[in-house]
Image: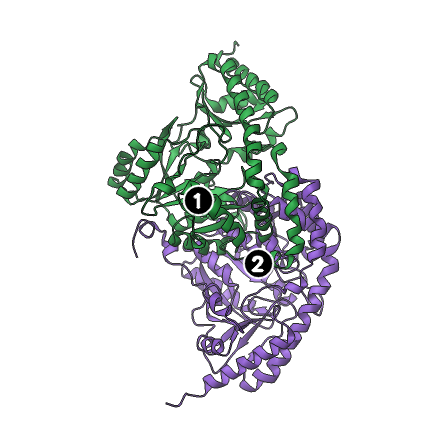
Chain colours: A purple, B green
Amino acid sequence: MSGIWQDNFSSVAKNNRPSPIREMLAVIKQPGMISFAGGMPAPEVFPVDQFYEGAHILKDQGKELLQYGTTEGYPPLKDFLAAWTAPRLGRKAGPEEMLITTGSQQALDLFAWSMIDKGDYVITEDPSYLAALTVFFNHGGSFLGVPTDRNGMQVDLLPGIIEKARSEGKKIKFIYTIVNFHNPGGSTMSVERRKKLVEISKQYNIPIFEDDPYGYVRYEGDHLPSIFSFHDQGGVIYAGSFSKILSPGTRVGWVTGPKEIIRNLTVFKQGTDLCSSTITQALVAEYCVNGHLDRHLPVIIDNYRVKRDAMEKSFEKHLTPLGVTWVKPEGGFFYWLKFPTVNTNDLFKKAIDKKVAFVPGDPFCPTAGAGIHNARLCYTFPSPEIIEEGVKRLAEAVTELAIPAVH
Amino acid sequence: MSGIWQDNFSSVAKNNRPSPIREMLAVIKQPGMISFAGGMPAPEVFPVDQFYEGAHILKDQGKELLQYGTTEGYPPLKDFLAAWTAPRLGRKAGPEEMLITTGSQQALDLFAWSMIDKGDYVITEDPSYLAALTVFFNHGGSFLGVPTDRNGMQVDLLPGIIEKARSEGKKIKFIYTIVNFHNPGGSTMSVERRKKLVEISKQYNIPIFEDDPYGYVRYEGDHLPSIFSFHDQGGVIYAGSFSKILSPGTRVGWVTGPKEIIRNLTVFKQGTDLCSSTITQALVAEYCVNGHLDRHLPVIIDNYRVKRDAMEKSFEKHLTPLGVTWVKPEGGFFYWLKFPTVNTNDLFKKAIDKKVAFVPGDPFCPTAGAGIHNARLCYTFPSPEIIEEGVKRLAEAVTELAIPAVH
């Protein structure tokens, strides 16, 4: 490859981290394919009418909404969020402690701008959110992966990992964690581990990015206090999003933390997109302030709980006999399966033949090879009947793969 | 400064490029202040009713618009833009040659991701767009500034600049240019220079980023062909925006170029914000497809032409006697003044006392100190009467500054 562009590409452009979901898109769209791959909300839970109800604001406050907004975010939305998130965060954040972002994906990018120099290390769960690994990698970050179990990151392993890395001269910049209904792991970090993680953060002077896009989509049990609420020295930045509780099409997320880090994110946001859309922020604010968010959330949760239960039942029926294991998620979008006998990259090809798609585990893992027996399955999009059919096909694929072909 | 955040900040976070407009915001908002500082559209030209007309799409296509969009952009908007920009670009771009961005600011960030390694050089006009300099700087870029005159970048100087830089071992990655109604310079690059620039791009194997947010806001004379249209080897990427021709609050921009660079920008967009809002893209598309963009553009142009003429007249009356010079812009938002006798950082303070604000020239200049006698004034926001009063106050500030105070 050469030419005026390629000759001038940056090293990161020449060396992109693979994005399997993107590469799989054409395959997933084949007719008859059952897809458990993407992490998309179900269209039937979108509150189209209630969201449209707020559209009058485009007329009533058109001159303000069509103008540039402040980089910090639309004040009525920030006011709502400060109050709405207070129970989870332990207190009401002030306006200078919160930034509205263009989806919570942008919070990751802005945070990476603020923290990562080329060669720095980031501690993440192993596995972790694919697009977080991508953006941290783009910014020059390397990873220290921490194994997880049904209670989330095994924080007891952290002191050893940190001390070993530091003894090797590695600079660790922050700990990235998805505490509730992990993507892709499905697990939720226990309260005990949250407290322990805060102690480790303080002891080793390493801040925490607490990513919580799924936290309000809980099917059973009580909400757990955020890590943010336990850190009495302000060492946590907390990111939330409307993508899973209202609509990803709005591209509205937020991030809450101490003023000094929020100010830094805000400065980088100016270089990145100046400000988030005032129009979508105002539409989201109208929806929320009118009470729709709290009224509609149970509809979403009920819809997804049924699908989670359907997938659990199908797994027990078709996959337990094959030795496949998993953690039952208490909320969120994902199952993370372990297939003891097959490589999930091979399984993916076989599954596509059977017209069922998932995401193989390896790209989620900062430790190379750690995920070759794992797969992520999303249950929010298909109906319970389709879920049963898809899991059945997947089990057939496993069975066929386990039996050596006769030549 | 120290603590869990500061101890872990990235080097670019510790070393941010100053953002004068941001720092000036509090001052500009003082009561009675006349501001020529920000580059904001006039609220009275926002087509509130026509924009609202398209809001029904939130109801009619709600399930699609509330969902994630493709990273590449909303197809109906891309179709419209491909046809609408064809006269300027010389041909209709294909879907894989265009990416919708979250404002054209994001195009700069994504392009920097694709091209700049720390230590690389970017050629820009001197002065240039502040937030482009900021984002290129954040990505590790340094600058080679090319002086401008009333016909834009003095492209004849380029071969010498390029050869000198290369002989010093500097790696030049691209040429960034604002061809029409330059921000902050006000000038428009002549057709002859556009062609020459393309020859230089080909000769030296350096691609061009053609930034054109103001190009459709022309008060008189004919539109000029884009640099994109002259480059027969596909070495130009062209960025446009709805911010100045419809609404910055939509945060919708676009970028057109060869597939290989658009694909690269798209990959980086996934890490940055996944996709632009489907909601704002659909609202903009409705507005455009229904013919409002073409019908409303003359309203905007007429409004701003009157203000440009008012500012020109006030300058002739109050500033010509003081030796101040400028280029009369044929479109766009800005005048770039040269004050031969005063430092504009000092003038800014004196002007604020007089309740008139502008942006001092220095931060726009990649060559340190090159802009200390310059100032950028935006005329689109205030009324002609306010413009006259503001320029009068500015002239008083210049006069008072030129007379040494008696102690």
Q: Is residue B108 left or right of residue A223?
A: left
Q: Is residue B391 left or right of residue B330?
A: right
* Residue type (three-letter) at the residue carrying disc 1: Ala
Q: Residue at x 60, y 26 (%)?
A: B382
Q: Is residue A29 above or below residue B109?
A: below
Same-chain check, marks 1 and 2 = yes
The residue where tag 2 is placed is B68
Give how far across and how far down residue B139 sits, in percent: 42, 46
Q: Chain of mark 1?
A: B
How packed is label 1: few (under 14 Cα within 10 Å), some, or many (20 or more)? Answer: few
Q: Residue furthest left?
A: B167
Q: Is residue A363 above or below residue A57?
A: below
Q: Is residue A93 visible?
A: no
How packed is label 2: few (under 14 Cα within 10 Å), some, or many (20 or more)? Answer: many
Q: Nearer the viewer, residue A235 or A390?
A: A390
Give how far across and how far down residue A211 sits, in percent: 58, 59
Give how far across and how far down residue A390 sits, in percent: 57, 77
Q: Nearer the viewer, residue B328 or B370?
A: B328
Count of numbered badges drawn on the protein = 2
Residue B50 numbered mark, or none: none
Q: Quadrant of residue B208?
A: top left
Q: Is residue B252 above or below residue B366?
A: below
Q: Is residue A48 above or below residue B242?
A: below
* Residue type (three-letter) at the residue carrying disc 2: Tyr
Q: Residue at x 68, y 66 (%)?
A: A218
Q: Chain of mark 2?
A: B
Q: Residue furthest bottom?
A: A406
The residue where tag 1 is placed is B86
